[in-house]
Image: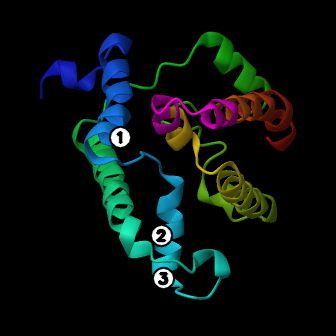
Amino acid sequence: MPDFLLRPWPWYVAGPIIGLMPAALLLLGNRALGVSNNLRHMCAALLPGAIGYLRYDWRREGGWNLAFASGIVAGGLIGGVLLGNPRPVAIAAATRASLAALGVSSFGGLAPADLFNWANLLTVRGASLILGGGFLVGFGTAYAGGCTSGHGLSGIADLQVASLVALIGFFAGGIAGTFLLLPLLV
């Protein structure tokens, strides 16, 4: 495999590609790029009529969104399995020190095995965090009218002020979660 495929692409190549994709989708197909609606479409397809929020014709927009979600899964498999980088993830020394102070010592994979493993998930605390976090993400994306990819890529490309406000909220929440909640949860 060519070495350039195994190395991260520079920001000046990857950034314009990522930035032009939503604009092209908006201009060529009148489609907004986003992920949060995919779960809603899957739930509407699997639980028709069970919940009022899911009572709509998911086939009209759902086909496009479900194909998009399938492409994300396929791209992840291609990127992770076929084009996976065998070198360990580069983590700054200051980040390693901060995580070590929280008890995280395994830096071999994409996510620390000290935190992300089945033994942690199958505890009451782990299951509560996963279910609570999933609920908060689902509620937040429904309340904000989209997720970070939808607002950050399509909404900004469409010059929507609401997407800028939502994006600022997403980043502020992420920073607060990192510095205020993560030390309490780990």
Point out the stretch of residues depicted in magenta. Answer: 153-166
- Could one spot residue 177 in this view of the protein? yes
Dot in front, 2 or 3 = 2
Mark 2 to mark 1: distance in Å? 20 Å
Please state which of residues 22 and 186 is positioned toward the viewer in this rendering. Answer: 22
Which residue type carries mark 1? Leu
83 and 48: which one is in front? 48
- Secondary structure at badge 2 equals helix
Q: Earlier in the sequence, mark 1 or mark 3?
A: 1
Where residue 90 appears, as percent x and y from the top left, is 48, 19
Which one is closest to the eye, mark 2 or mark 1? 1
State which quadrant residue 24 falls in: top left
Q: Amino acid at mark 2?
A: His
Q: Amino acid at mark 3?
A: Leu
Q: Are marks 2 and 1 in contact (CB under 8 Å)?
A: no
Q: Position of residue 93 (x, y in %)?
A: 62, 11
Q: Is residue 56 left or right of residue 51?
A: left
Q: Report whether residue 86 is seen.
A: no
Q: Which residue is mark 3?
A: 46
- Outermost residue on the bottom side: it is 49
- The alpha-carbon separation of the residues under discs 2 and 3 comes to 9 Å
Magenta stretch, main secondary structure class: helix
x then y, percent, for residue 150: 51, 43
The residue at which mark 2 appears reads as 41
| Residue bearing the label numbered 1 | 26
Q: Quadrant of residue 172?
A: top right
